[in-house]
Image (cartoon, coloured by chain):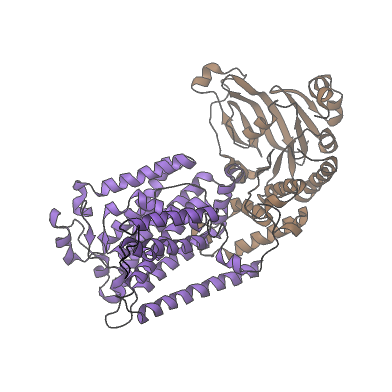
Chain colours: A brown, B purple
């Protein structure tokens, strides 16, 4: 196996008395497409939110590019309430905000599309470049960063060309059809120049044709941008098609992991998820 | 697209220059005493335009609903007044407190004369803005964690507190307590005796420069980040925009220009007194922002002039009783009726222009051949 890009280590996320993610361990290697699947409410999105810094985990650590970026342990009231494992193993508190995590090289999309509604397609992507800007507010306001700005615009232009949105770049983001909005959200994430792309149900609400297009699109961008992709998805066709490895969550716990073929024949997974809700 | 925005910039620059020339021409051809209302409206309009645009930067472009504008104006106003008042006048102005604790004046320090005056005034205005920005940074630390209405209430409270502090007796040697500060350089100080009258020109020039800087900021990468925060905070943060930093930045910059606007307001009003910077003033400015269009700089400017002209000038006649030649007394006309009519006009405007006069468009957008618009809202 190649180099380890993302490592989730003993992550437990407990909200009050509810354990949403229980002792999750998973690894995403460089260049892989890894899927996280499971029934609704299994804690997939919670796991995503922990990795991207939206939630601070109750216990455990997250490693990215060989560096520990997130770590926490139960404190205060949570100390007595904590129901998970590995208590006491972690002593540091590392809680970067989501923007910091993004700047480290991890960009995400959202389950329910969150584009900047009043902005054009072009501006949506251009704004995502802001986190890579070197100029300060004065040099930006007085146009001393003209070179950087021009470079950014050229980059965005090229990016839109690659993802096939160049012809609609001056339209309002919200006026695009649904499938293209999804594509735009991915393009926006790519503009932040990530190593790891996190896709939260990229095919949610898509028809079979759009799903096929998306499957091809994800494969394409991985090749072109040398990305590692970690996704949550319910469309089993898409998941089985493109992922190299799959993790299955149920009630916050990891119940299986392996290649698509292994997962498809796993008894526990079929009982918990595949068997009952194939088309859900 | 880029060429288009460049030609737009030239258009705006040309328009601004033409406006300045027009104002100077008006000022030097019309009789200043018989047209006093016109020039008053123009000067106050310019000041309010600047303050409204600074508020729009925060409320319209960053999506932070703040009502502290009058408080920041007050900071700028006092800083300006205290730093520019000629030393020889201080004894008379601060007579209750036996003179002023601050005994220098920037225009005099800079050598006096026209050069000292211009430099001193500009530097004092900038320092006034800096004072407002510094205070904004401090109160921003706790306050900017709040959202929408809560932020509005917190900043509203800040404005009231600042006003109370500046009226405090113990600070009298600096702020002159509840009494007015007077006899500092005003817009009319820029009229060259026996030569060009430049008071309104000065108001327009200062406001124009400040608004231009705000526009440049809004169109820069930071301005785009502000708009992203307004549209969707969660997405903005996920795309690497540091929320706390950018909100604080917008808050401080907005306060800076509110401070400069406060300094200009006392230049217009000829005296600085804490009791003028009430919450009602913030509401006036908020009204201008809403009428002009939340998220439109040109809308704020246009609305500022319309608002000031309508409230101070055009409707004045409603306040005086008129008896026609046949002895018929026109009903309703009496002191205070102006404000009734004015309120009704505002309600009508808000009803018919729900998103303000300009919506979130700018003036050059309207002049340009209309872009193909999508089906979106």
At 78% across and 54% down in the image, what residue appears?
A164
Tell me where residue B66 appears, x and y as whole percent.
Answer: 44, 47
Tell me where residue B293 appears, x and y as whole percent.
Answer: 52, 56
Q: Is residue A6 above or below residue B221?
A: above
Q: Is residue A257 above or below residue B60?
A: above
Tell me where residue A187 appears, x and y as whole percent.
Answer: 71, 50
Apparent side of residue A263 relative to residue A152 in the rendered image (left or right): right
Q: Is residue B164 above or below residue A152?
A: above
Tell me where residue A49 appears, x and y as whole percent.
Answer: 63, 34
Apparent side of residue B51 relative to residue A7 in the rendered image (left or right): left
At 78% across and 48% down in the image, what residue appears?
A221
At 81% across and 25% down in the image, what residue appears?
A277
Residue B142, image quadrant:
top left
Apparent side of residue B157 relative to residue B275 in the rendered image (left or right): right
Check the picture and name the quadrant holding the C terminus of chain A.
top right
Check the picture and name the quadrant holding the N terminus of chain A.
top right
Q: Is residue B256 visible?
A: no
Q: Is residue A246 above or below residue B185?
A: above
Apparent side of residue B242 relative to residue B260 in the rendered image (left or right): right
Residue A9, image quadrant:
top right
């Amino acid at each position: 196996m190649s180099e380890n890009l993302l490592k989730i280590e003993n992550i437990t996320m407990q909200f009050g008395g509810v354990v949403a993610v229980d002792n999750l361990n998973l690894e995403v290697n460089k260049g892989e497409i890894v899927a996280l699947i499971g029934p609704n409410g299994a804690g997939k999105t919670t796991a995503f939110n922990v990795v991207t810094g939206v939630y601070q985990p109750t216990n455990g650590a997250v490693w990215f590019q060989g560096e520990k970026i997130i770590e926490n342990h139960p404190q205060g009231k949570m100390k007595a309430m904590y129901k998970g494992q590995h208590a006491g193993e972690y002593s540091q508190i590392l809680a970067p905000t989501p923007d910091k995590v993004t700047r480290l090289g991890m960009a995400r999309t959202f389950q329910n599309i969150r584009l900047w509604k009043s902005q054009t397609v072009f501006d949506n992507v251009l704004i995502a470049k802001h986190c890579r800007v070197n100029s300060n507010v004065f040099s930006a306001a007085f146009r001393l960063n003209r070179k950087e700005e021009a470079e950014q615009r050229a980059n965005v232009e090229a990016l839109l060309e690659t993802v096939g949105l160049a012809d609609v770049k001056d339209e309002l983001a919200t006026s695009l059809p649904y499938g293209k909005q999804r594509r735009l959200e991915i393009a926006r994430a790519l503009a932040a120049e990530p190593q790891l792309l996190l896709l939260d149900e990229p095919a949610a609400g898509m028809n079979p044709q759009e799903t096929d297009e998306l499957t091809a699109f994800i494969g394409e961008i991985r090749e072109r941008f040398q990305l590692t992709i970690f996704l949550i998805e319910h469309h089993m066709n898409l998941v089985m098609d493109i992922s190299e490895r799959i993790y299955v969550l149920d009630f916050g716990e990891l119940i299986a992991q392996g290649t698509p073929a292994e997962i498809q024949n796993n008894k526990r997974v079929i009982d918990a998820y595949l068997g009952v809700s194939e088309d859900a | 697209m880029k060429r288009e925005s460049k030609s737009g910039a030239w258009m705006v620059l040309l328009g601004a220059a033409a406006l300045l020339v027009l104002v100077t021409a008006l000022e030097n051809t019309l009789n200043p005493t018989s047209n006093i209302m016109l020039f008053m409206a123009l000067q106050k309009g310019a000041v309010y335009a600047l303050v409204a645009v600074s508020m729009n930067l925060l409320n319209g472009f960053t999506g932070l609903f703040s009502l502290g504008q009058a408080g920041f104006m007050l900071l700028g106003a006092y800083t300006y007044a205290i730093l520019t008042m000629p030393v020889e006048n201080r004894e008379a102005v601060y007579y209750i407190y036996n003179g002023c604790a601050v005994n220098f004046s920037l225009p005099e320090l800079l050598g006096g004369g026209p050069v000292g005056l211009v430099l001193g005034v500009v530097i004092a205005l900038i320092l006034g803005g800096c004072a407002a920005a510094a205070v904004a940074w401090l109160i921003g630390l706790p306050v900017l964690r709040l959202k929408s209405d809560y932020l509005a209430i917190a900043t509203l409270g800040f404005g009231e507190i600042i006003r109370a502090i500046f009226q405090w007796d113990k600070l009298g040697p600096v702020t002159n307590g509840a009494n007015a500060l007077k006899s500092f350089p005003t817009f009319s100080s820029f009229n060259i005796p026996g030569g060009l009258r430049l008071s309104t020109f000065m108001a327009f020039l200062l406001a124009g420069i400040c608004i231009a800087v705000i526009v440049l900021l809004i169109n820069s990468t930071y301005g785009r980040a502000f708009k992203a925060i307004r549209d969707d905070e969660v997405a903005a943060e996920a795309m690497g925009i540091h929320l706390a930093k950018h909100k604080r930045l917008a808050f401080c910059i907005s306060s800076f220009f509110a401070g400069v606007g406060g300094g200009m307001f006392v230049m217009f009003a000829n005296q600085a007194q804490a009791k003028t910077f009430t919450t009602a003033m913030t509401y006036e400015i908020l009204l201008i922002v809403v009428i002009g269009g939340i998220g439109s700089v040109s809308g704020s400017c246009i609305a500022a002039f319309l608002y000031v002209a309508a409230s101070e000038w055009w409707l004045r006649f409603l306040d005086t009783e008129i008896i026609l030649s046949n002895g018929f007394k026109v009903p309703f006309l009496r002191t205070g009726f102006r404000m009734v009519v004015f309120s009704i006009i505002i309600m009508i405007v808000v009803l018919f222009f729900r998103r303000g006069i300009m919506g979130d468009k700018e003036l050059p957008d309207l002049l340009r051949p209309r872009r193909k618009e999508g089906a979106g809202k």
